[in-house]
Amino acid sequence: MDLTRNRPEYEITDEFLRAAFAKGDECYGFLDGSVLASYGWYANTPTAIDIPALKLHFDPRYIYMYKGYTHVKYRGQRLHAIAMGRALEAYKGKGFRGLLSYVEWNNFSSLKSCYRLGYSDIGNIYLFQLFGRYRTHADRSCLRYGLHLSQAAELPEPRESPSPVRAS
């Protein structure tokens, strides 16, 4: 059953799925019959962010949670936080120290969900564009977790900077 095909609200393309599975990423989520109610992706290798050609790097002793989504019909039920809690439990059982997430400073719904789960801010990564190239700076507290961005090519216009958070 392909729950996301021709469903743009899920923001999952065939290209995304091929890339995520090729690098070993995993998805945890909730189904309500044939409806994908909520999901989140988990990686243990450097992972692309929404800005093409930028990757987030992190300490491999942690799992990086990204691309969390809850369908509009299921919002307010805390499915995002419940799924992250279950994933955290599973990954800690495999020996990982915890979850890391990269959340934009103005994504208030995701930040609220993360804080409810017990995440804490660990620092900031600054991102800006100068002379057609992105410049990034991870503050010292991010570097303790290996969190930093790298780029590989010419990039599109910048987005707003995120604030990394961590669940332990």
Image: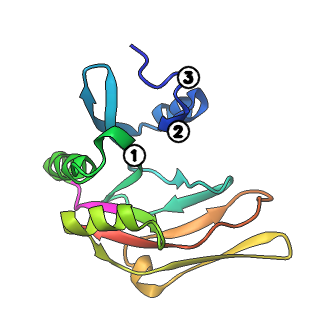
Query: In front: 153, or 108?
Result: 108
Gap between marks 3 and 2 measured at Cα:
10 Å
Residue at the image point whose x is 50% and y is 37% from the top = 9
Q: Which residue reaches farthest bottom?
A: 140
Which residue is under mark 2?
Answer: 11
Residue 98 included in the magenta stretch of the image: yes
Q: Which mark is residue 6?
A: 3
Which residue is under mark 1?
Answer: 69
Q: Secondary structure at mark 1?
A: strand
* Figure check: 91 above or below 162: above
Verify CB contact (< 8 Å) between mark 1 and mark 3. no
**CA neighbours of label 1 inside 10 A, class few (<14), some (14 to 19), many (20+):** many
Query: Taking 32 as reference, is 25 left or right?
Result: right
* Figure check: 131 above or below 156: below
Query: Taking 98 as reference, is 111 left or right?
Result: right
Gap between marks 1 and 3 measured at Cα:
17 Å
Q: Position of residue 1 (x, y in %)?
A: 38, 13
Query: In front: 135, or 110?
Result: 110
* Figure check: 107 above or below 26: below
Tell me where the magenta segment starts and ends, as one range: 96-100
Q: Which residue reaches farthest right?
A: 131
